Amino acid sequence: MTSAQTTSPKPLLLLGATGSIGQSTLDLVSRLPGRFRVAGASAQRRAHELVQLARAFEIPRLCVVDGAARAELVREAPDLAPRLTAAGAGGLLELVAACPGATVVNGLVGAAGLAPTVAALRAGMDVALANKEALVVGGPLLLEAARQGQSRLWPVDSEHSAIAQCLRGNPLQEVFALWLTASGGPFRDRDPRTLGQVSVAEVLAHPTWQMGPKITVDSATMMNKGLEVLEAHLLFGIDLAHIHVVIHRQSIIHSMVEFVDGAVLAQLGAPDMRIPILYALEEGAHREADLQRYNPVSGGPLTFEEPDPARYPCLALARRAAAAGGGAPVVLNAANEEAVAGVLREELSFAEIPRVIEWALGAIAPGRIASVEDALQLDAHVRARAREWVLARAR
């Protein structure tokens, strides 16, 4: 009998339980009885779904961030009301405080994930982080919080999980470069001159991954890969000039590490987010699980291509913000979030996303980020300005 079977179930706090990362994590909880239990869960607006999860997984602490949706939950399931925290951003912090010792799975979308992540790390709670925007907006703050709390930050993005696995046992001074793989999204073969006419349905038709709408749009622009360049720089301490992006259509190689002697290690696997989530929950160990497997014989050829700068201008914008440092990544992220929201509301064309971001990077002085409050204040300011830009274009 393994040690994983003899210990009590590991408590998990799921931030964003009704999203794709939360659902994948809950699938693991169901598949691996006795390994994990859900100590707390949050949802933004999907109150009815959270009620179902609370009953199915006997979750003792809950948070619905949206106030109207929280009231809906109380009306639908008054017996669950005592388990609820307050609404709003403060409710997420209350939820973190109510689940001491739990491993946090942060599947939130956007900069809203920053404050609860910092709070959890400071409290000594390990965090499995799928919320890449939190690291982009407040990377140094997260790393310092982890140091203060003696806690660990486990990357859940398949790319950074792959890098962590390839680096296991290898000192950083032996690393020459990181290679982040990207599917290229739904427009990898589309003429860049036609991207102003694509529909929202086309934008959301990702060729290999099933994800939430925001990250699916980011995959189409490859802003997700730009954010991941910033993440890799922060997480692994590799210079930006030695972090490369390559299009890999099959999404089988999740990233590669190139060493100073020319050796390259790659991590391969089926495009299944449950695999990197489980690796994080098991604290960097490979444990037995009945998950999708990759067969190199039947899997077909693996191909690699250079990203086309004309098709993916967001990649260069992300590198520009990363090189500038300070608050520039906050400006990048906030402008992107507002532009993506505008596309999803059909107020903005897909091709205008990089234009919003480029305008924000040039028009808004980022300043210095010394605290979570600094980051969130700048985030709110940029959002308001970018929203005005989007509305002006929509008229």
Image: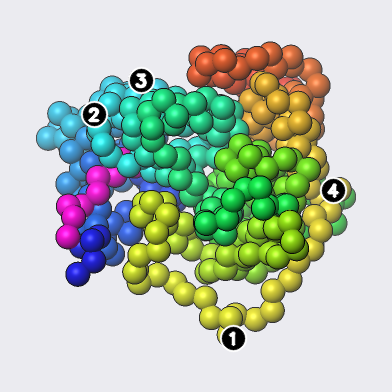
Using the image as rendered, state which of residue 109 and residue 232 is in the foreground.
232
For marks 3 and 2, give the CA distance: 12 Å
102 vs 332, nearest the viewer: 102
Residue 86: x and y in percent read 28, 22
User: Please, what secondary structure does the residue beneath circle 1 have?
Assistant: loop
Q: Name which residue type carries label 3.
A: Gly
- Say which residue appears at 39% left-offset and 59% top-offset: 285
Visible residue check, residue 160: yes
Residue 69: horizontal and vertical position, in percent?
A: 33, 31
**Element type where label 2 sits in the image:** helix
The residue carrying pointer 3 sits among few (fewer than 14), some (14 to 19) or many (20 or more) residues within 10 Å by Cα, namely some
Q: Is mark 3 on a helix, strand or loop?
A: helix
C-alpha distance separating marks 3 and 4: 41 Å
- Extreme-left residue of the structure: 79
Q: Quadrant of residue 117?
A: top left
What secondary structure is marked by label 4? loop
Residue on which disc 3 sits: 90
Label 4: which residue? 309
Looking at the rendered image, the disc whose residue lies closer to the viewer, 2 or 4, is: 2
Say left or right for 316 vs 234: right
The disc label shown at residue 98, or none: 2
Q: Distance between the residues labelled 2 and 1?
A: 48 Å
* Mark 2 residue type: Ala
Query: Residue 204 appears at what percent x and percent y?
Result: 61, 52
In this picture, which residue range is highlighted in magenta? 6-16
